[in-house]
Image (cartoon, rainbow, N blue to C red):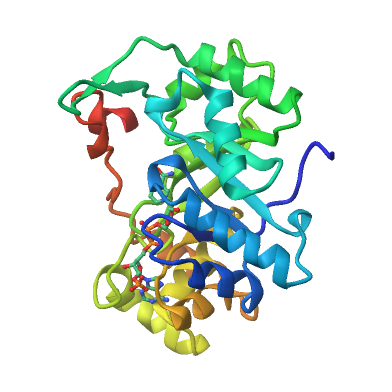
Amino acid sequence: MESTSPVPMVGFGTWKMENTDNLYKAVVELGYRHILTGHYYENEDMIGQALTKIFEETDIKREDLFISYKLWGTQMKDVEGALTNCLEKFNIDYLDLYMVHFPVAYELDEESNPKQVKIPIHKVWENMELMVEKGLTKQIGVSNFNVQSLLDMMTYAKIIPQFNEIELHPYLTQEAMLRFLKKYKITPIGYCALGRSDPEKGINCEETITEIATKYGKTNAQIAMRWGIQRGYPVISKSSNFERLKLNIDVFDFELTDEEMKTISSLNKNERVVRGENLENCLYDEIFA
Ligand SMILES: NC(=O)c1ccc[n+]([C@@H]2O[C@H](COP(=O)([O-])OP(=O)(O)OC[C@H]3O[C@@H](n4cnc5c(N)ncnc54)[C@H](OP(=O)(O)O)[C@@H]3O)[C@@H](O)[C@H]2O)c1
């Protein structure tokens, strides 16, 4: 097995994926090749069904896809068990990328309230490294890790995280984080590329973006995707609508000028969509501080 595989620049986000159909069609008909998943999304069975159908009914092979999966906070005790369970459900025998979803380990008490547990990330990371050694994943990375957490990892990691999957869109440009990741050769993956905008709100209605979109005959969402790609990282969006999925990957036939790139970046408001609410009682917003 090769040690790395290239990440497609547009990925299919599976959080809140409603059925197998969209994923199947996105891969087979639209050419999506990165399927970004995680235990937290609670849809491993659905993804497994779509993958099985893809491999059985088309010429697309496992090695044509880039499949990433994230370890959730309640799984930190058993990094290998979480991975083998995922592989079984997905009906595949390796991941392209296995990531730690948040730098927080916790468990649920009898009333299902989260309770932080003392599992240091360096222990978790040791086991992540073991997954590469065992050939269960090609690469390992993290998600939602801030600079301080990453710097700490540099002091012990045998494998420096190869990726940090973070929120990136025109309202949250994270310039300093991107500079840091570049310096340490960690590839960013930009999630919520559309700022989780409702089709009728936010980035989709941002006038500055609409002006640029009109020039290219594109939509605001396509401009946001393209802006991320031209900043140099793979982008992830999600849509439950086939036509919008089609638009979101149709972003390779035009190029934004440097001026337009700057204009879009100037929309930054340091506005986060993902604030770690589900880690309540554990860490919360401060993770990103
Ligand atoms: N690592 C992490 O902690 C983390 C956190 C959050 C998200 N993610 C990943 O990133 C993926 C995307 O994030 P997200 O779904 O939160 O946000 P997003 O992709 O930025 O935005 C999704 C919203 O945009 C709409 N939309 C999609 N395409 C559109 C288009 N072409 N025009 C207009 N509206 C459009 C969708 O509506 P419709 O569905 O109706 O089209 C939905 O309301 C997730 O699926 C997940 O895999 C990772």
Viewed as shown, does residue 104 lie left or right of 256? left
Residue 185's x, y, as percent? 66, 35
Which quadrant of the figure shows ligand 1?
bottom left
Q: In which quadrant is the C terminus drawn?
A: top left
Could you say which is closer to the camera, residue 239 or residue 164? Answer: 239
Residue 131's x, y, as percent? 67, 26
Could you say which is closer to the camera, residue 287 or residue 212? Answer: 287
What residue sits 51% from the left and 24% below the top? 150
Residue, far right: 1
Could you say which is closer to the camera, residue 161 or residue 66? Answer: 66
Residue 142's x, y, as percent? 52, 33
What residue sits 56% from the left and 67% below the top? 258
Q: Is residue 199 above or below residue 40?
A: below
Q: Is residue 35 above or below residue 148?
A: below
Q: Quadrant of residue 57?
A: bottom right
Q: Quadrant of residue 175?
A: top left
Residue 127's x, y, as percent? 60, 18
Q: Is residue 184 visible?
A: yes
Q: Is residue 187 visible?
A: no
Q: Is residue 44 above or below residue 210?
A: above
What residue sits 60% from the left and 23% below the top? 128
What residue sits 39% from the left and 71% below the top? 240
Q: How many marks?
A: 0
Q: In which quadrant is the N terminus drawn?
A: top right
Viewed as shown, does residue 4 lie left or right of 213? right
